Amino acid sequence: MFVMAGDINVHVRIDGRDGSPPLVLLHSLGTDHRVWDDQAAALARSFRVIRPDMRGHGLTESTPGDYTMAQLAGDVAAVLDALGVGAAVIGGISIGGMIAQEFAARHPGRTEALMLCDTAMAIPSLESWRERVASVRGQGIGAIEDGVLARWVTPGFIDAPPARGLRAMLRGTSIDGYAGCAMAIAMADLGPTTRRLKVPALVLVGDGDVSTPVASAQALMTALVEAGAPDVRFAVIENAAHIPTVEKSADVTRAMLDFLAARGGGDAYEAGLGVRRAVLGPAHVARSLDGATEFDRDFQRFITETAWGKVWTRPGLPRAMRSLLVLAITASLGREEEFKLHLRATRNTGATREEIAETLMQVAVYAGVPAANSAFRMAKAIFREEEEGG
């Protein structure tokens, strides 16, 4: 899709269900949103994954002149505004990670967590960036193509089909877009602002990255820890260079999923309360909590923290799938009250009637026809109520 973000028309790829927690992935210099394809496929099971093409990259319009990190972070904010997104997890690789840091500094209330891959607070030197920009403007992208690819991936991967895809992305980048973003990197020193960020963060780096080496990633991690960020994680991706999202995609994906799964642990009750309200509806949750007495108050907190805060918040399964699993289990065990509650909740989870019917067919095979028959009967009654406006 395309959205207007200030002075440019931005191409944005969105994956995942509407209503899922938003997660933004920002790509590297000379690529586009597809550098995150493998990660987006996994994350979209639980998140609404938003991948804009950067100014002058992919299908997004370019503007002449040098860009700045503030300008590029402003583009991200404008995209989120256009999509009606408030706060999100923000991830980025290379310049995308620098933009993520700038965005977090300018919009701390909109940054739920950072995932920073092969990036730094500064990438020297100014003179080398100016020389690269001069080559691109004078001779085109082809003048730097081989040198750039040699930094992006390891020698043994450079002729692999995914690396050839990276080369195609680089060739397709506009000269204005590449040069403008390169100068944004050249002029950026994010240290003073990044050292004040207090947001959970994951820092990843390929062990063979010479553009933003392990030492730069360690300095970034240290800055975040010293700033008092509540949860900072660090991992080195083995046998990878500057673009491990492509070369070692499974390793990067696993690190991201583990980080996101652990985020609920910081305040499992608050995280669980949010999911519980989103699934069951605020009115139901309010009744349950308001009706709690000294006798069952601890139980209400227990189920909110554990079932909702530590299981339903995990990114490994989409919310609709978890909803269907609950229906299958409660139908199989004859937990009629819980089955009805979660059947009504499918209006919020996105599970369709067709998917519910297929789930109950599976129940018939593995838990018995009587259990499935009872579940079908209850489901039909609830669907009839909904159709009649009850």
Image (cartoon, rainbow, N blue to C red):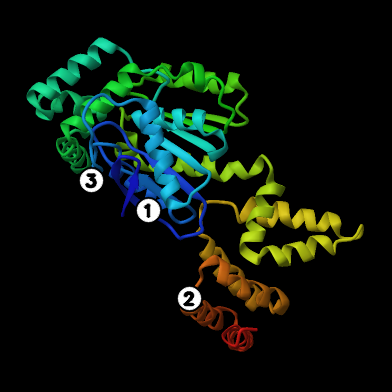
Disc 3 crowd, CA 10 A, few/some/many (<14, 14-19, 20+): many
Q: Which is more N-terminal, label 1 or label 2? A: 1
The reply to whether residue 262 is in sight is: yes
Give the number of the mark in front: 2 or 1: 1
Q: Say which residue appears at 19% left-offset and 30% top-offset.
A: 176
Give residue 16's position: percent from left, percent from top: 43, 57
In the rendered structure, the answer to whether residue 216 lies left or right of residue 89 reads left
* Residue 255 position in % (x across, y down): 47, 39
Type of amino acid at the residue the image marks with label 1:
Ile
Residue 183 image-quadrant placement: top left
Tag 2 and tag 1, C-beta contact below 8 Å: no
Provide the residue designation for mark 3: 59
Q: Are marks 1 and 3 in contact (CB under 8 Å)?
A: no
Whether residue 94 is visible? no
Find residue 340 and report its horizontal and vertical position in percent.
67, 77
Placement of 205 over or under 87, stated as above or below: above
> Which tag, 1 or 3, sits closer to the chain's start?
1
Dot 2: what SS? helix
Q: Residue furthest left?
A: 139
In this rendering, would 308 be left or right of 290?
left
- Image side of residue 45 versus residue 308, left or right: left
Marks 3 and 2, how far apart at CA: 36 Å
